[in-house]
């Protein structure tokens, strides 16, 4: 009979240990899900903040591009009006005046133009 009591007691202890293990596993699973949910929320918030910042940057860049485009358009219109209104003698005088005021820039433009024309009109050479 002692064997029957010992077996019953072992079965009860096993059931109790199994129940405790199940409760701990359930608790750990809930804790893990809560942590996962918090992490997901943080990630979502971080992504939301990042996309908001990128969006603001794009809007800002768009405004800058729009402003630059507007300024360029104004300068092109002004240049077009100048070319239509000015006679060749006046244009020559204006060019000489600008060249005298900005000799370094004039030299740089001359060198760049010379290199560009040399590249365009140079005979093509076979590469070995």
Image: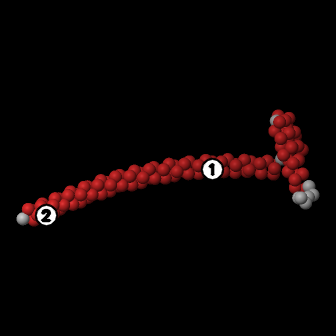
Q: Which-is-in-front pick, marks 1 and 2?
A: 2
- x and y percentages locating residue 41 in the rendered image: 38, 53
Q: CA distance from mark 1 to mark 2?
A: 84 Å
- x and y percentages locating residue 50 in the rendered image: 48, 50
Of the residues under marks 1 and 2, which one precedes in the sequence? 2
Q: Residue 94 or 18: which is nearer the viewer?
A: 18
Q: Residue 21 or 123: which is nearer the viewer?
A: 21
Q: Dot 2 corresponds to which residue?
A: 7
- x and y percentages locating residue 34 in the rendered image: 31, 54
Q: Dot 1 corresponds to which residue?
A: 65
**Quadrant assignment, res 128:** bottom right
Secondary structure at numbered mark 2: helix
The structure residue drawn at horizontal position 36% and vertical position 55%, both measured from the top left corner, is: 36
Q: How is the image coloured?
A: secondary structure
How crowded is the residue under tag 1: few (<14 C-alpha within 10 Å), some, or many (20+)?
A: few
Q: Is residue 71 visible?
A: yes
Vertical placement of 96 versus 50: above or below?
Answer: above
For this orientation, the residue located farthest to the right is: 123
């Amino acid at each position: 009979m002692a064997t029957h009591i010992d077996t019953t007691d072992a079965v009860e202890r096993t059931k109790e240990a199994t129940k405790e293990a199940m409760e701990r596993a359930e608790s750990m699973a809930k804790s893990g899900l809560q942590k996962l949910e918090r992490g997901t929320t943080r990630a979502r918030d971080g992504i939301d903040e990042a996309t908001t910042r990128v969006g603001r940057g794009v809007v800002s860049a768009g405004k800058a591009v729009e402003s630059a485009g507007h300024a360029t358009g104004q300068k092109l219109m002004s240049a077009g009006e100048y070319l239509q209104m000015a006679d060749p003698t006046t244009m020559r005088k204006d060019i000489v005046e600008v060249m005298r005021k900005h000799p370094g820039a004039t030299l740089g433009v001359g060198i760049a133009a010379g290199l560009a024309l040399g590249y365009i009109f140079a005979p093509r050479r076979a590469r070995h």
